[in-house]
Image (cartoon, rainbow, N blue to C red):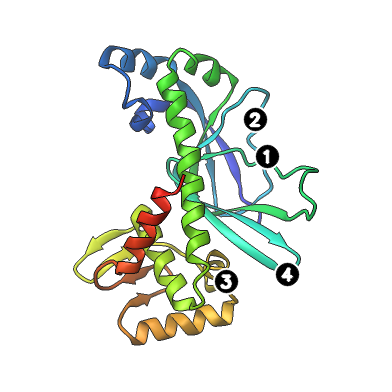
Amino acid sequence: MDAQFSSSGRSVRVLDVDPDLGARLPKDERERARAALTAHVYDADPGVWEVRQPARGPGAFGLLVAEGMLGLRTALEDRATLELVGRGDLLQPWVQLGSETTMQPTAGWHVIAPSRLLLLDRAFATAAAAWPEVVVALMRRLIVRTRRLCYQLAVNTSPRVEDRIVASLWALADRWGHVKDAGAVLPLRLTHRQLAEVVCAQRPSVSAALSRLRDEGRVSYTRSSFTLHGAVPSEVKALRDEVARKP
């Protein structure tokens, strides 16, 4: 099913939706930026996103995710990987690898959970030029996104599928989870196939590994959530530190 993108017909003040973008501005400048920096709102229902909407126009920064979750699936022949993005991520979904890439992968977007995106168009980019701190904050979002990809690449070098799943779920819990008495709850409707593409494994292997993790009392799951039991594993902490230190 195709994702349904719809314009809300309204604009919002970007710093009201994402105040961290203006966190380094002096208070008086922050108020000026808050009034000047606006963006049009788009809502998206789950499904395959063909990236025809919203139209970007020249000079746009891209789309800022305000709510929800989307996935970028990149496939090369019969192998695929899935990157999950959400609130605070800056996307340019129309950008593809060019002729400099010898083996061309196919890439496609999927709206996984109902999402809201802000179109940071040319008008926003022009206004934001008055506040370099905001532009730098957006650039930092791109760098953080690449760091998360570095973390996932490091995770996926592990030979054990169980280790890949645990490390990946803890990383996702950092962004989308919350703590309850039972453990860290991750309210995500991820299929076993989607999780398999996150950890670069075959779907049957992931299903078997999840069953073993459940029997060991480390992970429990339903169709709509995962729960991580116990403390963050020491190897996950070490991997986070290693990725953070790399230039």
The answer to whether 29 is drawn above or below residue 56 in the figure is: above
Q: Which mark is residue 56?
A: 2
Q: Quadrant of residue 26?
A: top left
Residue type indicated by callout 2:
Arg
Residue type indicated by callout 4:
Asp
Q: Which mark is residue 78?
A: 4
The residues bearing labels 2 and 3 have C-alpha atoms spaced at a distance of 31 Å
Locate residue 3, reporting x and y percent. 61, 50
| Residue that badge 1 annotates | 94
Locate residue 177, reporting x and y percent. 33, 58
Circles 2 and 1 in contact, beta carbons < 8 Å:
yes
Using a 10 Å C-alpha cutoff, classify the residue at mark 4 as few (fewer than 14 neighbours), some (14 to 19) or many (20 or more): few
The residues bearing labels 2 and 1 have C-alpha atoms spaced at a distance of 9 Å
The residues bearing labels 3 and 4 have C-alpha atoms spaced at a distance of 14 Å
The residues bearing labels 1 and 3 have C-alpha atoms spaced at a distance of 25 Å
Which of discs 2 and 1 lies nearer the camera? The answer is: 1
Circles 4 and 2 in contact, beta carbons < 8 Å:
no
The residues bearing labels 4 and 1 have C-alpha atoms spaced at a distance of 23 Å
Q: Which mark is residue 193?
A: 3
Which of discs 4 and 2 lies nearer the camera? The answer is: 4
In terms of sequence position, does the residue under pointer 2 or pointer 1 come before the other? 2
Classify residue 212 as left or right of residue 59: left
Using a 10 Å C-alpha cutoff, classify the residue at mark 3 as few (fewer than 14 neighbours), some (14 to 19) or many (20 or more): some
Element under label 2? loop
Element under label 1? loop
The answer to whether 83 is drawn above or below residue 78 in the figure is: above
Locate residue 1, reporting x and y percent. 65, 58
Q: Nearer the viewer, residue 200 or 108?
A: 200
| Residue occupying the point 33% across, 70% down | 227
Element under label 4? loop
Which of discs 3 and 4 lies nearer the camera? The answer is: 4
Using a 10 Å C-alpha cutoff, classify the residue at mark 2 as few (fewer than 14 neighbours), some (14 to 19) or many (20 or more): some
